[in-house]
Image: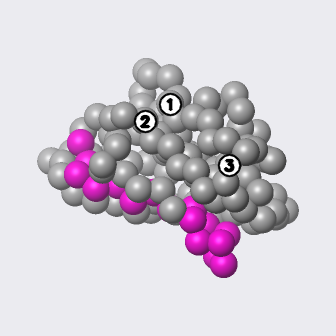
Amino acid sequence: QVQLVESGGGLVQPGGSLRLSCAVSGFTLDYYAISWFRQAPGKEREGVSCINERYGDTEYIDSVKGRFTISMEIAKNTVYLQMNSLKPEDMAVYYCATAPWRSDCPLDSVEYDLWGQGTQVTVSS
């Protein structure tokens, strides 16, 4: 069964850290672009970060550069998003998604065809 399962969300104070995980089953990650998206209430879904292991590419939106790090553990078929120095504006539901047979690393949701169920990240004191 092909599926993505996110975990690792929760409540954290501003300045804190969380690590999100996206466990993939049913296919091999290294032929896909994998991205993290987020959607806050009343806002459009936005691409946060992408990794394309086969082509050695990672991408981040400007607002998370220097704070978030995306990585992949092929042996576990899992993608991670390490989030440091979290801000209230990072609060959202975070989703992972895959785009097959890509040589690039897009952050546009229309390029992705398989999505996880999402995990809530709450940043509040």
Up the image or down, 25 lies above or below 14; here it is below
> Along the horizontal axis of the image, is 92 left or right of 59?
left
Mark 1, other Cα within 10 Å: few <14 / some 14–19 / many ≥20: some
Q: How many marks?
A: 3
Question: What amino acid does circle 3 point to?
Answer: Ala
Q: Nearer the viewer, mark 1 or mark 2?
A: 2
Q: Which circle marks residue 7 in the picture?
A: none
Foreground residue among 54 and 34: 54
**Quadrant location, the N terminus:** bottom right
Mark 3, other Cα within 10 Å: few <14 / some 14–19 / many ≥20: many
Question: What amino acid does circle 1 point to?
Answer: Glu
Q: Position of residue 102 (x, y in %)?
A: 75, 44
The answer to which of marks 3 and 2 sits earlier in the sequence is 3
- CB within 8 Å, label 3 to label 1: no
Residue picked out by circle 1: 46
> In the rendered structure, which segment of residues is drawn in magenta?
72-87
* Mark 2 element type: loop
Q: Specify the quadrant of the image occupied by residue 104.
A: top right
Q: Nearer the viewer, mark 3 or mark 1?
A: 3
* Structural distance between the alpha carbons of marks 3 and 2: 16 Å
Which residue corresponds to the image point at 43% horizontal and 35% vertical from the top-left? Answer: 61
- CB within 8 Å, label 1 to label 2: yes
Name the residue at the bottom extreme.
75
Mark 2, other Cα within 10 Å: few <14 / some 14–19 / many ≥20: few
> Along the horizontal axis of the image, is 17 left or right of 110?
left
